[in-house]
Amino acid sequence: MSEPQLSVRSARARDLAHALARRTGQPINKLVELALERYERDLEDKAAPVPGDALRRLMAEGRRSVAPGTTSAHDDLYDEFGLPK
């Protein structure tokens, strides 16, 4: 039984595939598989969130709802020695 075929109607794709096949000695079907696998990995890498991105987005969103000049010092809760009032 033969493998399923993929047909791409693009002179540029054909030219690139043949040039890479000559340069690498790899068959065109293997080059296409490798290229598609690499493209898939690149897409997954771009889609994967960087640790902390979600937290930074939430912090920025929260800052927008805070009135200008507001601080987080909470001085009104502590006495001059830093103890709770």
Image (cartoon, helix red, strand yellow):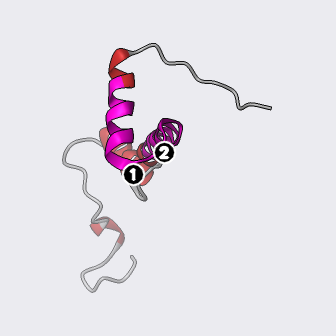
Residue 81 image offset from top left, x and y in percent: 27, 86
Q: Amino acid at mark 2?
A: Leu
Does residue 65 appear in this view? no
Q: Nearer the viewer, residue 45 or 73?
A: 45
Q: Secondary structure at mark 2?
A: helix
Q: Amino acid at mark 1?
A: Asp
Please give the count of numbered marks on the rendered protein: 2
Binning the other alpha carbons within 10 Å of mark 1 as few (below 14), some (14 to 19) or many (20 upward) gives few
In the displayed structure, would residue 80 be above or below residue 17?
Answer: below
Label placed on residue 4:
none
Q: Is residue 15 visible?
A: yes
Q: Nearer the viewer, residue 12 or 63?
A: 12
Residue at numbered disc 2: 34
Tell me the residue at 35%/16% (across/down): 11
Label 1: state its secondary structure. Answer: helix
Q: Main secondary structure of the magenta part?
A: helix
For this orientation, the residue located farthest to the top is 9
Of mark 2 and mark 1, the one earlier in the sequence is 2
Residue 53: which disc? 1
Compare residues 4 and 42 and report the one nearer the observer: 4
Question: x and y percent of residue 42 in the render?
Answer: 42, 44
Could you say where residue 40 lies in the image, as x and y percent from the top left? 50, 41
Residue at image position (33%, 25%) is 15
Q: CA distance from mark 2 to mark 1?
A: 31 Å
Mark 2 surroundings: few (<14), some (14-19) or many (≥20) residues within 10 A:
few
Q: Give the magenta part as a residue range.
A: 15-44
**Figure quadrant of the N terminus:** top right
The answer to if 26 sits in the magenta stretch is yes
Observer-nearest residue: 12 or 79?
12
Q: Is residue 56 above or below residue 73?
A: above
